[in-house]
Image (cartoon, rainbow, N blue to C red):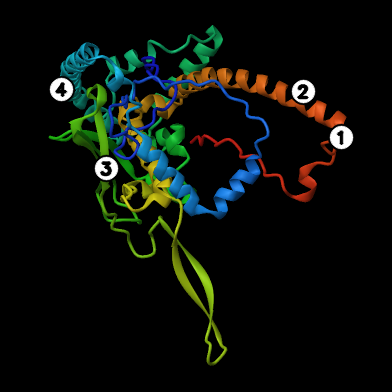
Amino acid sequence: MSEPIRNKKANFPVAPTPQNTPANNAPISSHAQQPGVSSISEENLDHAAAASIFAQNPGLVSMIQGRLGSLVGRSSGYIESLPTPVRRRVAGLKGIQKEHAKLEAQFQEEVLELEKKYFTKFTPLYQRRATIVNGAAEPTEDEVAAGKVDEEEEEEEDAKAKEEESKKEETAPSTVAGIPEFWLSAMKNQISLAEMITDRDEEALKHLVDIRMEYLDRPGFRLIFEFSENEFFTNKTITKTYYYQEESGYGGDFIYDHAEGDKIDWKADKDLTVRVESKKQRNKSTKQTRVVKITVPTESFFNFFSPPKPPTDDDDTVATDIEERLELDYQLGEDIKEKLIPRAIDWFTGEALQFEELGDEIDQDEFDGDEDDEDDEDEDDEDDRRSDGDIDDESEEEDGTSKPKKEAAECKQS
């Protein structure tokens, strides 16, 4: 089996959306380097008190955000203070930059056309994969041989034992068609998707027969999830479409606009995106109580097909939360398009995980290095304060004020 290609990016980029893209000219390309600022130690700053003040005064937070927003893009006056000949040169450089931006936009358009060109070449391979996964065909001897070329060599005795076992399996009649739960297993190995899949979802996702994508006539793409007959919904396919804005952003990149998902036609009492709760109601007149059942939203992978809506201009209080959900939703779509679909077999076998983990380990090592330095400084400060009697030795856990640590997300395996 061919070695999966290492991801181009070790960390996940923030999706460029209309909400987090500045109106003024600023680098929004996913390839842009994020600026790094060294930490600034501030003395005599009571973070808890500040947080309490802001929590009790949401109007103050809104006012501060409004004032800061009005300063974005405002000139400092430096350019205007330059001599006329210098300002003329600055204007000339801006003109040159506009020509550069036109070429960048042209470059991105040609890259998209190149992606579409090769996508037409990939499509027959995806179709062939689907026939094997769903038991409509068997791989050829050449395909099997090509898949074994890159496998690690085993010890001689193990190789002989495996060969004998393989011969027995070949002679024995097989009742299993295709590769059962192929897409479910692949998704459970893809960490960002695995976190969304609940135990209830698995029963429905076992009926996934294919995941594919297609490009739109306008900038954007559509993800297509195909299902066999099942007890949960009547849809044969459920799609989700990601749209980009018509105008390019800074650097010629496409700017994500919004996503739309298909409505799922759930069968009676089979909606996986809600759960039923029993609630007591009391009649004010008769004082009698009764138990009623209500449906409330619950976590489910199928919420993926109901993407969040961009915030409105007058909805500042929840804008940040919605922006985070939009970015996560966009990144999940990109992961399916760029990782899961092209290398589904490597996610099914788990081989793709080593390349994801390699990138994570590099980032974690860098983070841990900084964290160790900070911990050392904190420990030194704590020792000094202990010697002065500022800190009690009693643990915070005893009075229940400490928060439990969040456990790392478990990667489900089939």
Label 2 sits on what residue type? Asp
Mark 2 vs mark 4: which is more N-terminal? 4
Q: Of helix, strand and loop, which one carries label 3?
A: strand
Is label 3 or label 2 in front?
2
Check the image and report above or below for 123 versus 310: above
Q: In the rendered view of the protein, which quadrant contains the N terminus? A: top left
Count of all numbered marks drawn on residues in the image: 4
Task: Identify the disc placed on residue 380.
Answer: 2
- Tell which circle, 4 or 1, labels the residue nearer the N-terminal end: 4
| 259 to the left or right of 179 | left
Q: Which mark is residue 252?
A: none
Distance (Cα) linking label 4 and label 1:
68 Å
The tag earlier along the polypeptide, 1 or 3, is: 3
- Percent coordinates x, y for residue 333 in the rendering: 33, 36
> For the residue marked with disc 3, what is the amino acid?
His
Q: Earlier in the sequence, mark 3 or mark 4?
A: 4
Image spot of residue 302 (x, y percent): 37, 49
Q: Nearer the viewer, mark 1 or mark 2?
A: 1
Residue type, mark 4 in image: Glu
Q: Which mark is residue 389?
A: 1
Which residue is labeled 4 in the image? 113
Q: Look at label 1 and name its amino acid.
A: Gly
User: In the picture provided, is 252 more to the left or to the right than 305?
Assistant: left
CA separation, marks 3 and 4? 22 Å
Query: Dot 2, how many residues are within 10 Å of its Cα: few (below 14), some (14-19), or many (20+)?
Result: few
Q: Is residue 176 visible?
A: no
